[in-house]
Image (cartoon, grey):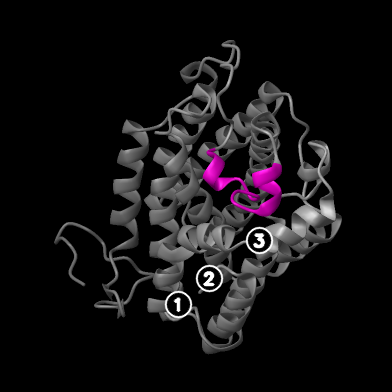
């Protein structure tokens, strides 16, 4: 890869380094472009959104096709109002999951830049992304409160598994897990913010998140590609296994089953029908398809890791 004559080459990136997707771009140039995008397209949710507007009667908090029970026998027996109530609680569950995940991501990003030059564009962009994620987390928390649903934390087991991940994760493993959490939710939110059946506040929250997450995904993808080329073999193998296990946990934790009891459904029956639902499986695989295609091309979906991804239901 060539660099401009007046620029120092990226010392972390060997010349002409490439993977199956082609030559890797200079780390600093990527970060500078992302910083420019951040300057043009960043939002303050506290002022951008109308938090005082009351909910609109008859509108959904999440598109019905994305609700976990959609098109199951149980769904077909539920009255419309109960379906909308389930969507409201699932939106709160997903917002709670998003906060949990973004707190993990912020810690992983801080670890990533700890030993890197503090004046580099790469580090400045990571700090900018951390600021974005702080705003997203407070935005999601405010959305939960506004919707009148409780927060739905992940199970104690998954909470503590994440504590281990934050402690032992390798750099490529961190970025693979970052993409797992970002891209599936991003796919669903891209279907949500243009949907006029959905509450305006929810559409506004998802629009902000989609715009800002696009550059977070770019940053993570570029760094994961670099890491999968430069990391030692043991670290690449560990990344494949840890990403596969993260996919398995993520698929289980995606919707807290307490939402079913909250709207008067039998929790066990609802969970069983979600697991058996071909529609739900198709929705989750569609959300993961762009990511799994990318991970496959750069060598993450191999061996035990690939089998774990299949067992998660996210990989067909």
Tell me, yes or no, whether the highlighted magenta stretch contains residue 3: no
Q: Quadrant of residue 309?
A: bottom right
- Graded by Cα atoms within 10 Å as few (under 14), some (14 to 19) or many (20 or more), the crowding at tag 3 reads some
Farthest front residue? 77
Looking at the image, is mark 2 or mark 3 earlier in the sequence? Answer: 2
Element under disc 1: helix
The range drawn in magenta is 63-77
Residue 310 bears which disc, if any?
A: none
Residue 172 bears which disc, if any?
A: 2
The answer to whether one can see residue 289 in this image is yes
Please tell me whether residue 85 is drawn above or below residue 176 in the rendered image.
above
- Graded by Cα atoms within 10 Å as few (under 14), some (14 to 19) or many (20 or more), the crowding at tag 2 reads many
Element under disc 3: helix
Rendered location of residue 217, percent (x, y): 43, 54
Q: Which residue is mark 3?
A: 250
Rendered location of residue 263, percent (x, y): 78, 36
C-alpha span from label 2 to label 1: 7 Å
Of badges 1 and 3, the one in the foreground is 3
Relative to the observer, which residue lies in front, 284 or 167?
Answer: 284
Looking at the image, is mark 2 or mark 1 earlier in the sequence? Answer: 2
Tell me whether the residue at label 1 lies in contact with that at label 3, contact meaning CB atoms closer than 8 angstroms: no
Please tell me whether residue 259 is drawn above or below residue 237 in the rendered image.
above
Tell me whether the residue at label 2 lies in contact with that at label 1, contact meaning CB atoms closer than 8 angstroms: yes
Looking at the image, is mark 1 or mark 3 earlier in the sequence? Answer: 1
Q: Which residue is mark 1?
A: 228
Identified at 32% across, 77% down, the residue is: 14
C-alpha span from label 1 to label 3: 22 Å
Identified at 46% across, 56% down, the residue is: 117
Q: Quadrant of the N terminus?
A: bottom left
């Amino acid at each position: 890869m060539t660099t401009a004559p007046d620029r120092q080459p990226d010392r972390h990136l060997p010349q002409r380094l490439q993977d199956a997707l082609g030559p890797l771009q200079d780390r600093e140039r990527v970060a500078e472009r992302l910083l420019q995008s951040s300057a043009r397209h960043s939002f303050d949710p506290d002022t951008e959104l109308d938090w005082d507007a009351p909910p609109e009667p008859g509108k959904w908090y999440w598109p019905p096709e994305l609700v976990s029970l959609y098109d199951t026998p149980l769904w077909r027996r539920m009255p419309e109002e109960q379906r909308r109530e389930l969507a409201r609680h699932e939106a709160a569950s997903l917002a709670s999951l998003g906060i949990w995940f973004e707190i993990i991501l912020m810690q992983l990003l801080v670890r990533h830049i700890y030993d890197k030059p503090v004046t580099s564009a790469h580090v400045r962009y990571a700090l900018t992304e951390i600021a974005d994620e702080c705003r997203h987390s407070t935005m999601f928390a405010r959305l939960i409160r506004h919707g009148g649903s409780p927060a739905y934390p992940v199970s104690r087991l998954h909470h503590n598994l994440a504590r281990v991940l934050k402690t032992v994760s390798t750099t490529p493993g961190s970025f693979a897990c970052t993409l797992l959490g970002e891209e599936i939710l991003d796919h669903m939110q891209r279907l949500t913010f243009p949907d006029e059946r959905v509450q305006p506040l929810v559409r506004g929250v998802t629009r902000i998140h989609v715009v800002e997450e696009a550059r977070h995904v770019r940053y993570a993808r570029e760094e994961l590609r670099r890491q999968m080329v430069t990391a030692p073999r043991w670290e690449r193998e560990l990344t494949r296994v840890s990403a596969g296990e993260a996919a398995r946990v993520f698929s289980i934790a995606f919707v807290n089953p307490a939402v079913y009891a909250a709207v008067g459904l039998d929790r066990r029956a609802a969970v069983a029908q979600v697991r058996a639902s071909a529609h739900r499986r198709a929705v989750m695989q569609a959300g993961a398809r762009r990511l799994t295609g990318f991970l496959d091309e750069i060598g993450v979906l191999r061996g035990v890791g690939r089998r774990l991804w299949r067992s998660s239901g996210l990989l067909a």
